[in-house]
Amino acid sequence: MTERREKLDIIKDILESIRDKGGSIKPTHLLYKSNLSHDSMKRYVGDLMEKEMVAETEDNKTKQKKYAITDKGLKFLADYKQVKEFTDSFGF
Amino acid sequence: MLSYKAYKLSGDPKYKFFTLAFGLISAAFVYYALFITLLLTHVSRTLTNLVGQFDFVFLGQIFLTILALMILTIVTLKVTQQKVQMLLLALALLFALFSYQHFLKFHLISFLLLFILSHQFYTNYLEKKSTNAKLVSVAFYILAVAEALYIAFVYSNEFFYVAATVVQLIGYLVLFAVLLRIVYHDREKGKA
């Protein structure tokens, strides 16, 4: 049985998916990469947009909606390891 | 600090309460140290008399510490029902504050809570097998031992009080070492 992912891990997975795709990703790709339901992904992305870690952009050629990682999102990924080590030490 | 960072990153309230718990523990020590310094330096006769009559310095420390340890226990044991959380808090505070033998009951409750926390952190260590998780568990066992020594002091001599204070200091230093390990380990990795 797989372990339930913590909120922090889900946020990290979403941001890593965007970063690894060169900084922006299509919503359908993110849905596949993040391994979340459509509703959950929308909720998490909405939350991340509110926290200014992710921004909604438009592809220049196709005019398709995309999600881009911001500097704040990149900073989260840098801080994540430290925070993860802390949460693991206390079993959160 | 790290807990607050985790709260800012995830928005998960458990990290907020964890920050609050350690903030309260620090506040309890600062509060107690401040009043004891004021009393020992005899700044105010009124203050000395007031403390002598009502013992509110120690009661204040009891309140802050029990509140902190109970919040830590609730967060660590993942007690999610608000009614249960309130009940646990009320029972611990009522038992410690509204009775005689404050000193004994305060350290008895602290010992029980710290023992539960130590066991929980030990279970976490068995799962994670990391040095930091082991150190957190060891630190809380040491803090529990310190409480046991405070209890022993009630039935014995001053040696146990001094020993308890030293052991408690060691417990908090081990926790501080964990914090340094996390912060500096990350920085070292960043440099590499």
Image (tube, grey):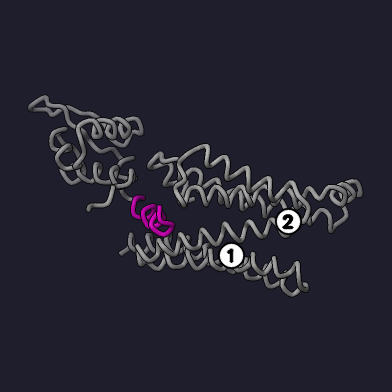
- Residue B171, x across and y down, in percent: 57, 66
Chain letter of the residue carrying label 2: B
> Residue shown at 58%/52% (left/top)?
B69
Chain letter of the residue carrying label 1: B
Give the label on residue B130, or none. none
Relative placement, left or right, of A92 versus A64 is: right
Q: Secondary structure at mark 2?
A: helix
- Residue A60, x across and y down, in percent: 12, 28
Q: Main secondary structure of the magenta part?
A: helix
Mark 2 or 1: the one toward you: 1
Residue at numbered disc 1: B143
Pointer 2 or 1: first along the chain: 2
Which of the pair A24/B99 is nearer the observer?
B99
Residue at numbered disc 2: B33
Q: Secondary structure at mark 1?
A: helix
> Residue shown at 68%/53% (left/top)?
B30
Q: Which residues are magenta?
A: A79-92
Separation of residues labelled 2 and 1 (CA atoms): 19 Å
